[in-house]
Image (cartoon, helix red, strand yellow):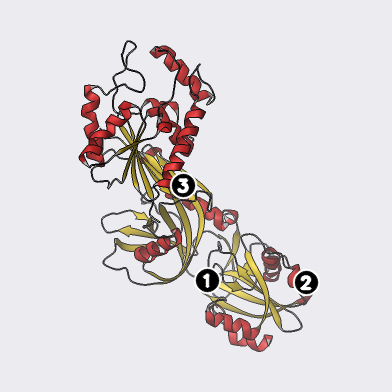
Amino acid sequence: MKHTTIYYVRHAQPLRSADSIYTDRTYPLTEKGLEDRKLVTEFLQDKNIDVILSSPFKRAVDTVAEFAEQFNHNIELIEDFRERAITDKWIGIEEFMIYARKQWEDFTYKLPKGESIAEVQGRNLAALANVLQKHRGKNIVIGGHGMALSTLLHHYDSSFCPEQHIDMPMPWVVKMVFDGSAMMAMEKIDLFNPDKEPDYNNLKVTTTELGKLKAYKYTVIFAWRDGKWLYCRQKNRDVFETPGGHIDMGETPLEGASRELREETGATKFSITPAFDYAVYTNLGWANGQVFFADIKELGELSENFEMSEVCGFRTVPDKMRFPKILPVLHEAMEKWLGLDKNKEEFLDVYDENRNLTGRIHRRTDEVIPGDFHLAARAWIMNKKGQFLITRRALNKLGFPGIWEIPAGVVSTGENSMEAAIREAKEENGITLLPEKAQLVSYDKRRHVFYDNWLFQQEFDLADVVLQEGETIDARAANWHEISAMMDSGEFISKDYFANFDLMKDVFK
């Protein structure tokens, strides 16, 4: 379904005075207002407008009338888009400023025969909802007023304040993009300064749980490959950025993220999972997005037809980055989603290539020095039927998200590998392993890690398995042949990660 785009136009300068013969409904535009409305006509001419709506007040109608006449559009008047009723008598500027401040402080405050902000907001939101339902997928112009527009902006952005309302120029345009009834982006357009850039030094980034925002314009992908985050550099820039970009019309966020990942990194084999929502607010508007975690299995060549010139791995955010006020915030949120923030102070003993302790320790989150090794342990839990307890990794686990495995993990400083195997089983599936049931059957070396394979021959009941949030999402029993077949199909961690796989098979079968 096509997005609905609304261009809300605040009217140009009206002719208002205490001794005027006009009423609030009939104030015309001043000569300056008539001249300035040409900016509205010029701005809208290439926007493929389908529908023009307006408040019934003359100043609002006249601001969009020139455009409507040039492009042969009718203007439909909607009463509920009218401006706020203040009171039944003229009030001076000082009295008005006091009144306006009270209204912003208390949305229910109003003068006799006037309206509160809450009432204005309520009828404008109801009218907008009807428009979104009736004209879904259209490009729409709404001619309206400052306070009516401010109440809509405050509804979708609670940080909108009285100062922003006072600073509204006349005329002014706010572009709102909707996915159904949910707003996915909003852009404030200064017709007098059309080339004005957002103030990226004072932006605000917020993150929230997945699906909370419900409508998205952008994707950001944190891609993990061989212990590093992949960042891309565009051909015409010297800074790095995460893969990501606009969600194309008709795409789901997942489809858009997958496409961007392939185009910007050359990834050919990967798993990708939505993690959380985010929104970025600047002085000129805001937009919603969704952040994804991708585990890259294989990378191909970057296509010359795409915009990126290189892809590099970094342990954390690069020093030279695009969007320096945005990416660190999202990176920190991604680390939290992955549970990495809990491991920042985990330390490991350092071994040499012959498995001798060096006396040094290593912070787990730091890059390993070439020639250094650390120790890890695996827990093979086997019952009398020859079945092993296997669990499926959570989708937010670094390395093999969503893949089946046995309990395993690094050995921290101060514990031995059997203690680590018992701890990992408890942390990942809630099973208590008994030391007297433990047997060290083999060890292997892969990259910078020595893996100890511990066999625990003890009974287990799947009903006793307690899946741990952020660790495991499923559990089952499987024999050696079933595990081997799952490895071949890609459901289980690859045989490549078990250097003595054939030897272990002879021990376990």
Give whichever of discs 3 and 1 has the lower sequence position.
3
Query: Marks 3 and 2: in contact by CB < 8 Å?
Result: no
- Closer to the camera: disc 2 or disc 1? 2
Give whichever of discs 2 and 3 has the lower sequence position.
3
Q: Which residue is mark 2?
A: 434
Quadrant that contains the C terminus:
bottom right
Badge 3: residue crowd in 10 Å (few <14, some 14–19, many ≥20): some
Disc 3 marks a residue whose amino acid type is: Ser
- Closer to the camera: disc 2 or disc 3? 3
Query: Marks 1 and 3: in contact by CB < 8 Å?
Result: no
Q: State the image quarter where residue 436 is shown.
A: bottom right
Residue in the picture at 68% in, 70% down = 421
Q: Secondary structure at mark 3?
A: loop
Instruction: Measure the alpha-carbon separation of dots 2 and 1.
Output: 29 Å
Badge 2: residue crowd in 10 Å (few <14, some 14–19, many ≥20): few
Give whichever of discs 2 and 1 has the lower sequence position.
2
Residue 394 can be seen in this image: yes
Query: Marks 1 and 2: in contact by CB < 8 Å?
Result: no
- Closer to the camera: disc 3 or disc 1? 3
Residue in the picture at 37% in, 65% down = 265
Instruction: Note whether 153 is above or below 117 in the view shown.
Output: below
Residue in the picture at 32% in, 68% down = 302
Front in this rendered view, residue 296 or 258:
258
Q: Secondary structure at mark 2?
A: loop
Residue 344 in the image: state x and y as whole percent: 57, 54
Quadrant that contains the N terminus:
bottom left
Residue 476 in the image: state x and y as whole percent: 67, 74
Q: Which residue is mark 1?
A: 448
**Residue 181: mark:** 3
159 sits left or right of 191 in the view: right
Disc 1 marks a residue whose amino acid type is: His
